[in-house]
Image (tube, rainbow, N blue to C red):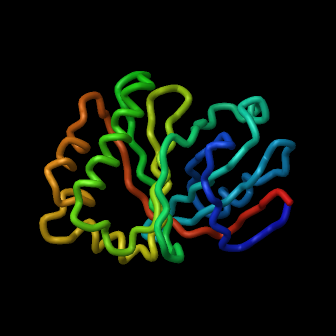
Amino acid sequence: MTIHKGHWPTPDDATVVVAREWPDADAARAAYKSHEGLVSFTAYEGIDHDDAFTYEQWTSEEAIRNLDGAPVFHLYRGHRGEGVPGCLVIVSVEFEGPDERRQRDWIDLVFEALASEPAYPKGGISGYFHVSTDGTRVLNYAEWVSAEAHLAALAAPGADGIGTTDEWKKVQTYPGMSGGSVKRYRPVFSAVAA
């Protein structure tokens, strides 16, 4: 593994993802251990909160069998535009009970809402939507040019969340949603397989 500071992994559908929250950046960094099957490990510190986050890419579910209780995800859909990321926004959505179809339908609805916008939010670079293997969660790994750009998009006149169209109301009131969060991070440590 090669150690980096400030590396931005590229989500892809050839890997299995483990995404975990930590109480602080030190705990997230300390979680790193080189393992067979680990493709990349990136620790992030909270920008406007104390929490930390790790995004781990693995070769297979078999490679992570000893990571007890860690949420496991697969990439379902993603989009990448232009720009240099300065802020990672993790959007986490929880559903009432497992339902793989509902996870994918909700993500497809987000893409329909994005397509209904006259323009993408200024400063948004990417959105990579992952589904949990237990069927209860969606995680959006979204890159932005800065935390300020993300906050400005949320506060834009007419914006309801990120969007301004009626399609976003359907996203936000989708049946079976039971919770979620939006948190901003920056990378502090990465280990990447050679």
The image shows residue 99, relative to residue 81, as above or below, that is above
The image shows residue 57, relative to residue 162, as above or below, that is above
The total number of labels drawn is 0
Q: Which residue is painted at 50% across and 37% down in the image?
A: 131
Q: Quadrant of the C terminus?
A: bottom right
In-front residue for pair 4/113: 113
Rendering quarter of residue 17: top right
13 sits to left or right of 151: right
State the image coordinates of residue 177 (x, y, percent, origin top left). Answer: 30, 34
Q: Which residue is painted at 39% across and 36% down in the image?
A: 94
105 sits to left or right of 53: left
The image shows residue 178, relative to residue 86, as above or below, that is above
State the image coordinates of residue 57 (x, y, percent, origin top left). Answer: 69, 48
State the image coordinates of residue 95 (x, y, percent, origin top left). Answer: 36, 31
Q: Quadrant of the N terminus?
A: bottom right
State the image coordinates of residue 116 (x, y, percent, origin top left). Answer: 23, 54
In-front residue for pair 69/164: 164
150 sits to left or right of 72: left
Q: Which residue is painted at 55% across and 69% down in the image?
A: 186
Q: Which residue is painted at 45% across and 25% down in the image?
A: 100
12 sits to left or right of 62: left
